[in-house]
Amino acid sequence: MSVEERITFCRICEPLCGLVATVEDGKVTKLRPDPDHPISRGFACPKGIAMTEIQNDPDRVTRPLRRRADGGFEPVSWEEALDDISGRLRAVIRESGGESIGFYMGNPVAFSYSHSLWLKGFLDGLGTPHYYSAGSQDTNSRLAASALLYGSPLVVPVPDLPRTNFLLIVGANPVVSHGSLISGTRMREEMKAIVARGGRVVVVDPRRTETAREFEHVPIRVDTDSWLLLAMLNVILSENRHDALALARLADGADRLRELAARVTPEQAAERTGVPADRIRALARDLADAEGAAVYGRTGACLGSFSTLVNFLLDALNAVTGNLDRPGGAIFPSPPVDIYDTAHKEGLDSYGKIRTRVGGFPDIVGMLPSGVMADEITTPGPGQLRALFVSAGNPVVSAPDGAELERALPQLDLLVSLDIYVNETNRHADYVLPTTTFLEREDLNLAMLAYQVRPFVQWTEPVVAPRGEARPEWEIIQDIADRIGIVPFSTKKIRRLGRLTRLLKPRVLADLMLRLGPGGDRFGLRRGGLNLRRVQRAEHGILLADTMPTGVIEKRIYHDDGRLHLAPEPIAGEVDRLLASAGEDDEYPLRLFGRRELRSHNSWMHNSPKLMSAGRRQTLRVHPDDASRLGLADGEIARLSSRTGSIEVPVEVTDEVVPGSVSLPHGWGHKGGWRRANEAGGANSNLLASAAHEDLEPLVGMTVLSGIPVKLAPVREPVPA
């Protein structure tokens, strides 16, 4: 028996923790944290360690599967599958044009540098706008706010954790997430270090999260963050606690922002948020007076009815207090690959460049809201979605009103999935094509370079050969592109090379990006610069500096006038909409929000025995006051209903959620080809989310998953079929 250890890194979420894989006779038998990794330093979460069970899962798809007439699947050869898929695509193109073909990208492949490059190139080669992703349920409102403020959706500041003295967290739980849209790991240690040096960490959240328990907690009613943030801006600007010099130097619209904020007093905000007015004033003053402060929001800030407004206000607070691009404030990463300028020159950092055929929602970085996918399939007319690829995604579970989407999928002429499992979405597919896990592919930490707290670069080779007949996604996309006669590259200059682009393998592009980047070797012209060979030799990665540089904000503003736009019209319009919004709903009096689980990652890790041990189950957390009023006992089954749907879940009575709210984790309710996940039970919380156009957040079509009006009742009678 041959046994060896190989160095790699996790690609489940943003921290990209270093891992050491034990390989026995070509099989991964163990994963452990890499103690020599410069960033994670011997840390990895349970999901990364459990990846051995996903890798070796007997339920994993390892051969191409074709759908039979009876709805089941049968294995076929790659040639048979790709020939049929390509023939059917050519027929769709002849009848409806390339613009009728779409792609949905799930979260896992966002961490594959090669997949992201080839997918966008494939769509641009077809000339189709139909690009959808899990971002509509995750990050798109954050990106839209950046587009409005900085002129590019890719410019997202991160808190300077090593140097900050006041960290305000809104709707994030980094003790569990380990940093979302932050690539840093060891988040608990970073935050404890802030307190140890005399600083503060304040968590605004409707739940006493794992992070809130360890630091200062400000309980707030669900989906009212924008009221709080506007009131804080009101206090800072009206009391002249803002950095007037920084605003005069960098920004336009400060006076207009002052007018908008003045419309929400701390007393008005207190009525909506449940946060006392005196505490709002104190929080605003403490933030403004702190020597180095950063405001950071994440999923909870991205999923409400006013999510783009919330994310804009988070950065507006950083700006008016002078904490943008300041040591200890919200800083702009300087990655070794020129992500910002390259994307801007190629027009890839778009916002509103195209709009959905149905509903007229804007794109963000080319992505359209997944909430309109069902309508795009079922609504006739030019550009109607006729063929769809889904890569490592499960929109029937993750998108709003999955039942509507599930009814629409059979109307497609072709549905193809690239995945490692048969899930709730691709069980309707014509083909399920087996893909590699991150342990079976090479990778560069490209996707997270723009979100790093410390500049770091790492490359990994595959740890083991692909299991069965699995292939990397980029190879599958390239094979299909060759068969239908398109060049899968977004850059027009490269597309002109035609068939010569077959020479541009992912690692060739990785080397080019590193060499031509800000720290690159310029093909030998810059001594000591980066190239792929140098990064490959450093198996644990290269820490390029202990902190990110500041003084770079002028390079991160992409508006034509070179100024921050503090009060663009879309944001002013959202303030109007906010002030006109209703408060209570008598028929649906509770507000539903999600929660992140340490041993879950969306919908795809519920088949791991380690992660699903000890009788794990999905529970709805309900405040004792609400449980008493509704006559609900701990552990009892209750029916949770919205205007869109209804599910049944067990109740967990706890005072960790604020009264009037209920919390349910997403990603449950399985009925795919994964046996343990199916047995785990649970319910799909997104069946309660609306895909109606009027219910999507208007500035980017974001799905509203936080603050869904719901009602709750005991289940004491059989539910009618």
Image (cartoon, helix red, strand yellow):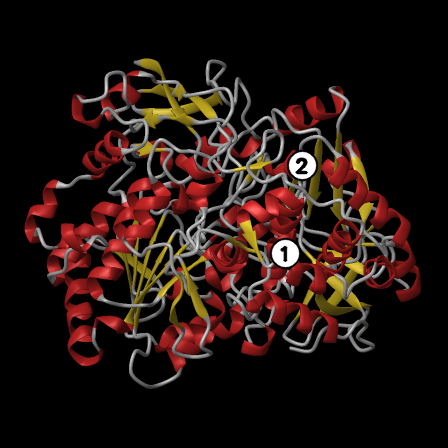
Q: Can you say which quadrant of the picture contains the N terminus?
A: top left
Q: Quadrant of residue 30?
A: top left
The answer to whether residue 414 shows anywhere in this view is: no
Which residue carries the number 1 mark? 254
Q: Amino acid at mark 1?
A: Ala
Identify the image quadrant of the C terminus.
bottom right
Question: In the drawing, what numbered circle is on residue 467?
Answer: none
The first of marks 2 and 1 along the sequence is 1
Question: Which residue matches tag 2?
Answer: 614
Question: In 3D space, how far apart are the residues under numbered discs 2 and 1 (Cα atoms)?
Answer: 54 Å
**On the image, which quarter does residue 378 sit in?**
bottom left
Q: Is residue 343 left or right of residue 516?
A: right
Picture coordinates of residue 373, whole percent (x, y): 43, 71
Between 190 and 380, the one lying in front of the other is 190
Residue in the image at 55% along x and 73% along y:
691
Question: Residue 28 vs residue 267: left or right?
Answer: left
User: From the viewer's perspective, is 148 left or right of 544?
Assistant: right
Considering only vertical position in the picture, is 54 above or below 692?
above
Amino acid type at mark 2: Ala
Q: Nearer the viewer, residue 648 or 587?
A: 587
Instruction: Check contact, mark 2 vs mark 1: CB within 8 A.
Output: no
